[in-house]
Every structure is written in C-alpha cells, then in structure tokens.
Image (spheres, rainbow, N blue to C red):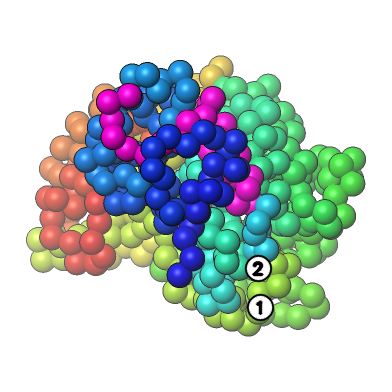
Amino acid sequence: MSRLWTAEAMVAAMNGRPVGNLPDGVDGISIDTRTLQKGDAFFAIKGDRFDGHDFASAAMAAGVGLMVVSEARLPALGRLNVPMIVVDDVLAALGALGAAARARSSAQVIAVTGSVGKTTSKEMLRHVLTPCGKVHAARASFNNHWGVPLTLARMPEDADFGVFEIGMNHPGEIRPLVKLVRPHIAIITTVAGAHLGNFKGLSEIAAAKAEIMEGLADGGTVLLNRDNEKFSQLRKRASELGVPQVRSFGAHKQASIRLMACEIGPEHSDTTVRLNARDLTLRVGAPGRHVVDNALAVLGAAAFAGADVDTVAAAFADFAPDKGRGARHHLAIGEGSVTLIDESYNANPASMRAALALLADAPVEAGGRRIAVLGDMLEMGRYAEKVHADLADAVIEAKADLVGLAGPEMKHLEAALGERVPVVWRETADELAAWLQETLEAGDVVVVKSSLGLGFGRIVAALCGAYPVLKPECSG
C-alpha cells in the first residue's frame, strides 16, 4: 500500500529544509499529540492558546515519524533527536501540503457551507457515497483555517470523493479556504442568523457564504437552497461570478432537486424527490424536516459527482445523526424510559427552532412530558435579547410541558414565555443537569440544545451516567 506522503514529496510541497534522517514517508498527519499515531508527521502549529513546539517531547514519546517545525523555534528543539522538516511558517506549510494533495487528486471534491447543517451534510455525504467509492472526509468538524488544510493534507491520492466542510464567523474567512479546496461541487445549506452579532444582517451573512463559489473548479456546480429567503441574492452572486452550473434544492416548484412529498416520523422521514425528471423514494434515517433539506442537497451533490443515484438513495435509510447533532438515546427510568434528543453541539435561531420541531414530532408515552432544555445562543451581539425572546412561540408550538433554561441570555426567553409554560432557570449547565435528574419521569422526551460554550454536552453525559442506557450508548 502506498504511503500517504513520501518525505521527499512533503519537503518539495512545503519548500522545507530536512534535518536528520527522514523516514521514507508517513501514513498520517497530526497537530495534536493526544491523538498522534506512531509514525505520524506532527505539525507544530502555533494557535491562539497553544504552540505545538511546546509539545515536541510529547510527540516524541508518542512515536512521531517526523516533525514539521518553524525555523524560529528550531534552536529550542536542538536537543531532540527526531527527524524534522524546517519551514518558515508551520500553518502555511500545512496549507501548501494541502494544496499539493488537491493538485495530485483525481477525486470529485464537494465542499459544504451554510448557517445550519454543514456537519450533518458532510457526514451524510460520507455515508451515502461510501458504497460508491473511497471517500475522504474529516471525522470531526474541521472547518476552519487549520482544519480545512489539515483535512486536505490527509486526503489519500486514490480517493474517489473528497468532502470538505467550510465554516466562518466573519466575512472573508471562507474565501482562502475554498481556494485551497477548489471543489467541483459547492453546497450552501441555508442562510440564517448564526454568528449574527458579527454581521449587519442576513444579507451580509449570505454574502460571506457566497464566497464558497469563488473557489469552484472549472465547470463547477453550486447547490443553493431554493426555499431560503436569500436564494435570489445567492443566485445573483453566482451569475456575477460566472458559475457554470447553478442548481437548487427544496420544495419550491422550480427546484432542481425537488421535494415532492415528505412524511416526518419520530425516527426517520419518508420522502419523494424529483431529480432529472425522475421521482425517487428515500427513507432518511434521521428525523426532522431540516434533515430532509440536507438530504436533498446531498442527493443532488452525489448525483452531480457521478455517483450511482440508486445506490446513494438506498444508503440514506441507515444514516444516523452524530452526538450533539440530533442523536437519540433511550434511558431506563423507573418502570419505563426517557427519550433524550442530544442537540448539544451548537445553536443559533434556525437550529434552535429545528431542535424544538424535533421535540414537537417526538411521540410521548401516556403520562410523559415534552421537556425543552435550552441554553444561550452565543455570538448574537446586539440581537441577543430579541433572538432569545423570539423563541417563545417556537417553544409553545413544540408543545413543551416544561422548560429548563441556563445562561444569562435565556432570561429573555423566560420573560417572553411568562406564564404560558412552567420554566426553570439555572445559571449553569451543571445546575440544570442536577435539576433534570430530580425532575425526569418515565415517558418523558427531552431535547437538549445550546451553543457549545454553555457546555450542555455535560447534561447529556450526566443523564447517561445517571440512568442505564437502553440504546445506543451515549456520552457528552
């Protein structure tokens, strides 16, 4: 089996200077000594909080194959007996290696951005394309200025499909990343109020998402959400950029990948989709109307990438959401069980409403209650009070019987709900977890949703630790 990278190719791609006796090559690339595998190349990236050069000894202890280090830090590493490639800037060198990986690849490359659904769409693409060929995609949500080049640099030369998630929380962040990835197909899942505090409004967010079109490969295709209010703005930008192929997905009658019928169930959705004048029946193995939207985009992208449409359509049935992104856990309590919907990874106004819709659609046993456990949505800036208060109607529409809140901004939702539903507010996620353990009863359905910084994953972990897990295993 061929190596991921020969040392010679790495030196050439990064314009590096070899120091010591380099190995023939490496089969893995790491920027974290905690997950480094024996023989990997370790890139000593300097981040906001940590400098990888400070972990050189840990990399050696883990069996590093070679290290990529900066010229400026080399004197401090002089006593380490480990092969090195010395460069001016380690992160820039990783980007150069990523560019080399893209240049040598014959894979069909798909990039995904959007305010909601990026990671779910990326994982769904991985899942449905796997029966059609060798798929490369990051295991985690590696969608920023180091995650994207790292994922590129890890792409095997013989991959058939490459799937990349590209995120942003400020204008201008997508542009350099997509120019590295150079996708054949780009998806903008939707435009919504994520990171709203960093923008003047939705139009500015749409403009930032549209940057993904600037890096399309020759003859590339962009897939846009036809049902989104910013579709016209995005389509106009595609025209300005001369994007050759503009396709759309949604329930709109003019959508290229059109949702004809949809039945949302508690564990899956059954849909009929029209693509290229043909109706396809899909069972999507995760519930939620928002997940159906992701599936439409994924189906279209897979088809445009040359995958067998029937094989892809069949693969949707056993797709399951990841931890923190809609995964469901059934916990034994008393003589019955509790259904826990884990949406703890992140939150913005659109994804919060989607999570509450999942709660509304979840079946509740006799005597059971729907419980919404919600935390602050971060990076809302001057819009924070309004967007939190505006969730009140969605909570009522979700038929919530009880609401647990944490975080200072959720005080605005508590005030907006008034006496319409019983509300408990706690300062922290841990206090909310303790309250939940005192409150839960057999038959309840609980959705847990907040921005990542609130630590609501600890609530999920606490519940999974307090009660026997019937299915599947879970962790916070």
For residue 109, the mark is: none
Residue 109, percent across and down? Answer: 66, 58
Q: Nearer the viewer, residue 456 or 334?
A: 456
Amino acid tagged 2: Ala
Residue 24: quarter of image: bottom left
- Against 7, residue 321 (above or below) is below
- Against 28, residue 271 (above or below) is below
- Against 275, residue 34 (above or below) is above
Residue 398, percent across and down? Answer: 44, 50
Q: Residue drawn at (50%, 54%), measured in percent from left and top?
A: 5
Amino acid tagged 1: Val
For residue 302, the mark is: 2
Measure the alpha-carbon separation of dots 1 and 2. Answer: 7 Å
Is there any visible trace of residue 178 in the rendered image? yes
Residue 187, percent across and down? Answer: 68, 52
- How many labels, in total? 2
Mark nearer the N terminus (1 vs 2): 2
The quarter in which the N terminus is drawn is bottom left
Q: Secondary structure at mark 1?
A: helix
Q: Residue drawn at (60%, 43%), measured in percent from left and top?
A: 13
Question: Which residue has dot 1 on it?
Answer: 309
Q: From the viewer's perspective, is 371 left or right of 255?
A: left
Q: Nearer the viewer, residue 416 or 82?
A: 82
Is residue 189 a member of the stretch shown in magenta? no
Q: Residue drawn at (29%, 51%), measured in percent from left and top?
A: 38
Tell me the magenta residue range: 78-102
Q: Residue drawn at (70%, 41%), measured in percent from left and top?
A: 179
Q: Residues within 10 Å of mark 1 (few under 14, many from 20)?
A: some
Residue 129, percent across and down? Answer: 56, 70
Do the numbered discs 1 and 2 sit on residues whose CB atoms are within 8 Å? yes
